Amino acid sequence: MPKARNGQRARNATSMTSDAALLAADRVLGKESDYRSNIRRIQAAACLLAERISHRGDVETALLSGDGVKQDEETLSAEKERMIGFLTEQRDRLKDIAKGNVTRNRNVDTFLTAVKDVRDEILVKQQERATVQENGNGGAAAASDILED
């Protein structure tokens, strides 16, 4: 009789562990939009800024117009070069942000795929365990095999 109880305990422990893992996986998968929302927010702000500092955009036009500034031509030319350099640097930073967002999205995809794979594997193991229990084929031995996996 004690052997049967130990087998039952093993099956119950396995079932509870699997159920907890499935619950955790479902929670993670349910938060997919949360993982992506910050990336989308950063990307939206970067797109708005990119539009403003684009070539011949509002900021470039305003900076390079030189209206109301009375300077000699050499100083004005040097100032325009400095402004163009600044805008180029900011455009490069925005490109880096966009590349980082692509990487973050890929990382989220990879993470979610891994969680889905683990979840699917747990479901398969649960189905196998249920089949073994229904058939009555060595319940305690089958439960210990599943625990070892």
Image (cartoon, rainbow, N blue to C red):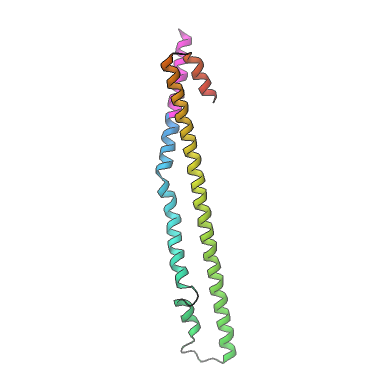
86 up-or-down from 136: above or below:
below
Q: Viewer-proximal residue, 5 or 114?
A: 114
Q: Decide whether residue 113 is among the magenta residues.
A: no
Q: Tell me where residue 140 appears, x and y as whole percent.
A: 48, 15
Residue 95: x, y in percent? 53, 64
Foreground residue, 131 or 101? 131
Using the image, determine if residue 12 lies above or below residue 107.
Answer: above
Tell me where residue 122 appears, x and y as whole percent.
47, 30
Main secondary structure found in the magenta portion: helix
Q: Is residue 12 left or right of residue 89?
A: left
| Residue 58 lies in quadrant | bottom left
In the rendered view, tell whether residue 115 sits above or below residue 44. Answer: above
Identify the image quadrant of the C terminus.
top right
Residue 22 picture quarter: top left
The residue shown at (43%, 64%) is: 45
Q: Quadrant of the N terminus?
A: top left
9 is within the stretch colored magenta:
yes
- Left or right of 88, for residue 15: left
Q: Measured from the top left, where is residue 90 in percent x and y?
A: 53, 70
The foreground one among 120 and 32 is 120
* Residue 28 placement: quadrant: top left
**Tally of marks:** 0
Rendered residue at 47%/9% (across/down)? 2
Q: Nearer the viewer, residue 62 or 134?
A: 134
Region of the chain picked out in magenta, as a range:
1-18
Residue at the (51%, 45%) spot, across then down = 110
Establish if 108 lies above or below 26. Answer: below
